[in-house]
Amino acid sequence: MMVEEKPAIFPTMSLQSAQVVVGDNKVVFSVPQDLLCSHSSYFQKALGPRFLEGQAGRIELPEVSEATFKIFLQWLYGQMVRSATSMEWPVEKQIDPYSESICERHHDQKMKGEESENEPDEEESSCSTMEDFHERSPQQQELEANETKAIRKAYNLLVDSLLDLYIFADRYETRHLRNDIMTTLGDYDDKLQQYPGLEPVAKAFDNLPASSTFCQYLVMQNALCWDPDRDSEEFEGKLYKSLPPEFLFQVMIINTRRANSENCPETPFFDELNDRCTFHEHWDEGQKRRCRDRRKADEVFFRNILVACAATVG
């Protein structure tokens, strides 16, 4: 059962801090206890008066890396600002001008998008094609191939960092962070036109429930976007054998449904994939609607997660 997190801001928080000891090297972090507990039911229980950790104000997390916990803290401290911007005051209960502006902006963008569909793309003629690629010199082709590999390597490192953070959020019951990670990953994938592929699948399914939103995102992304022709023989030999049966079964179910669908088989699946709330944990439709209304304003917090992850992977 999900319990709603109560916002914590400095004027309403106690001055008490919890000592969080992280990793094999026992690095100690001092974190405001109210802030920590307001976003994690795990810490709320563990640091309560019924447990020794709560009485001592100290908790050890030997299986959590220092890098992952630092990213968590980067996200956690940002939530105080987020709480302040989302709190309702009496005057706002009558009319919420922010939400109205979001709806209007979304409508305007949609109308502009529909108009632009009928206009020719000025850049279309200048786009690169595979024919252009093959006309380049071998040196140019090799340079571009190496750049592509370097981009993919950096992307995979960032996804792995997000996965570590999600595993932390799952283990320590931080639902809001899990939702933010999925939005961050989805937005980043759309911007780069990349997707996680098969590389993180084994680690995700080994450390998370198959029903988790991260695992479900990997299932749907690979079911809809995976291209086996782009995998090397070395990739096939090592990675294919490590794929969990549960993952393969779910991918098979999606593609069987696509194959058996008579009308527009792709549309509903891609609509689900592109809807961030598909991979969120919401209590009801009202919360889902508020999440969508806040998406634009919360972009800075999603970027906050990306910047923190990028800093840890170099």
Image: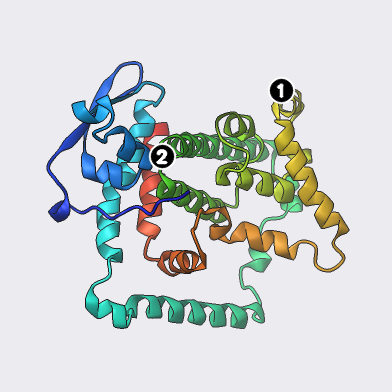
Quadrant including the C terminus: top left
Residue 106 location, x and y as percent? 48, 76
Residue 154 location, x and y as percent? 51, 36
Vertical arrangement, residue 23 with respect to residue 112, above or below:
above
Residue 20 location, x and y as percent? 27, 29
User: Is residue 2 left or right of 61 when viewed as pictured?
Assistant: right
Pick whichever, 140 or 203, lies toward us: 203
Q: Is residue 231 visible?
A: no
Residue 250 location, x and y as percent? 74, 43
Q: Which residue is mark 2?
A: 310
Vertical arrangement, residue 206 with respect to residue 109, above or below:
above
User: Is residue 200 left or right of 132 when viewed as pictured?
Assistant: left
User: Is residue 277 left or right of 224 when viewed as pictured?
Assistant: left
> In the rendered picture of this protein, how many numbered marks are placed on residues?
2
Which mark is drawn over residue 238? 1
Q: In the rendered structure, which amino acid carries the disc numbered 1? A: Lys
Q: Is residue 182 visible?
A: yes
User: Is residue 73 left or right of 241 when viewed as pictured?
Assistant: left
